[in-house]
Image (cartoon, rainbow, N blue to C red):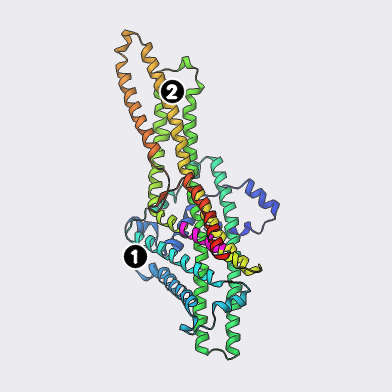
Amino acid sequence: MKSIDKFYSNLTKLSPTTLWTKIKYPKPISISQIMKYCFHSWKQYAVRLEYNLHDYQNHQIPMKFQTFRRTIIITIAAIINISFLIILVIDPNLIGLPISLQNLNEILHIQECRLLAEFAICNLLLLEHMCFIVFKRTLCYECHVNYIFIKYFNYNDSNLFRYFHQQYSRFILIINLFTNMIYKILTFGLTIIFIMIIFFTIKSFINGHYYLQNIILFICIAIFVFIHTSYTFGQLFISMKHLMFSIEFFCLQFKQLLYHLNNILKRKQRQPQQQINHSNIMFIDCLFWYYFHRPYLKLYNETLQMNYSLRSIFLSIELISKCSIIFCSLFYGRQIQMNLFNSLFILLLLSAFGSSTVIYSLVSSFPQLNQLCCSWLSSYNAQRQYYLLQRKQQQQPNQLITGNHHSFTNNRRTIRLNFFIQTLSTNQFGLTCGNVFFINKYNYMQLFLLNFTLILLFYKKICL
């Protein structure tokens, strides 16, 4: 895991030419190491528990302070952060805070810090609700995504074709490059803002505007807010990129299944029509049930397990995305002059919206691949039944007796294949946004276009 971190950090120090070469011709990255990295991110940003997969598999997560230490610290910081923002929006004088939203506007030379505080409150409440659901399911041993981590912790990279493995490595490099860059820019900007606010409060104390206990209280609160805000950036970017890694890996597995299916079905097309016999049909059927049907059912089952654990997360992602694009349009419409700080805030809001859009784009490819698979199998099934019917009509009367056994076997395989194709067209292979809707290309594009409607609606209603 440390070697991966070192590799990612060194990636940003390369020259543009060397970086382009590494992205175009990437070295294969170990999938098992990526899965371990994803599990570490899952523990840190989603569950907030310190446990290992062996304890989870045996239903023996230790109930001790070491396990819940991260939960306690982050939850306390979240309560302080949300309470501070609510007091800041309502009235800072309730607890004698030496700073107000108007002061923040003057320090950062921006307008409407209230919008940013309101967005932060909505965002933090959604994230805390999401983490509580995942935390509860993990303690009840109902978080099935852990079983997926268990399976792929010792994944053999040779099981994935070299082309798909190279494509996956390229995807990881590109996503890491952008997410790490945005995360570092926002963290650096947050640090500058924190220093400026602390300097302003100390200057106010020196000028005799506030008492010492008010300054000490505010600095303690500001430290907790800084820590939790940095942690929230990790939730929005670091954990999001690992979610993208997991989804893209399952997409590539599905594409590899389609590649196997295409090769199986092409066996029939490569043979002349007069050379196709019952043995060829039986052989193709055996290849299909062994090399496609079984792996497909396994992948479908793993996707179901992942969906059960992630559907509440996708609902939170969608709500955060809608809030970010609405507040971004409102905040941008209130700015008189752009500078470093309001540009950073707009980057934050747009990045939250962009990351959710990329995730939904990846997830929506599952139903598309499944539909393609269904189309290929329907075409093959029609040709197969046409051949069997033609063969039966060409049989001589003395061959009908010996062909009864073959006919019974073919009918059984035909019924099984028909039932599988019917199930394939309605099984909703993919992920869902909570219990609200199934994520496919149609819903994805519908939600994407709805964002522009929301922008125009709120911008026209409030900013004009």
State the SS at label 1: loop
Depth check: give the residue in front, 23 or 336. 336
- Say which amino acid is labelled 1: Pro
Closer to the N terminus: mark 2 or mark 1?
1
Say if 355 sits above or below 445 in the image. Answer: below
* Residue drawn at the location 36% of the way across and 59% of the way down: 138
Q: Amino acid at mark 2?
A: Gln
- Spot occupied by residue 464 in the image (x, y as percentages of width and height): 58, 64
> In front: 4, or 168?
168
| Most common secondary structure along the magenta stretch | helix
Question: What residue is disc 2 on?
Answer: 383
Is 327 in the magenta?
yes
Residue at 55% x, 49% y is: 29
Q: Please tell me whether mark 2 or mark 1 is closer to you in this view.
A: 2
Q: Residue 57 appears at what percent x and percent y? A: 34, 55
Q: Residue 127: percent from the left, percent from the top? A: 44, 64
Q: Seen from this angle, which residue lies furthest bottom? A: 208
The magenta region covers 318-329
Residue 378 visible in the displayed image? yes
Look at 60% across and 81% down and name the residue there.
199
Picture layout, residue 185 above or below residue 18:
below
Residue 147 shown left or right of residue 175 in the figure: left
Callout 1 environment at 10 Å: few (<14), some (14 to 19), or many (20+)?
some
Q: Nearer the viewer, residue 286 or 395?
A: 395
Residue named by callout 1: 62
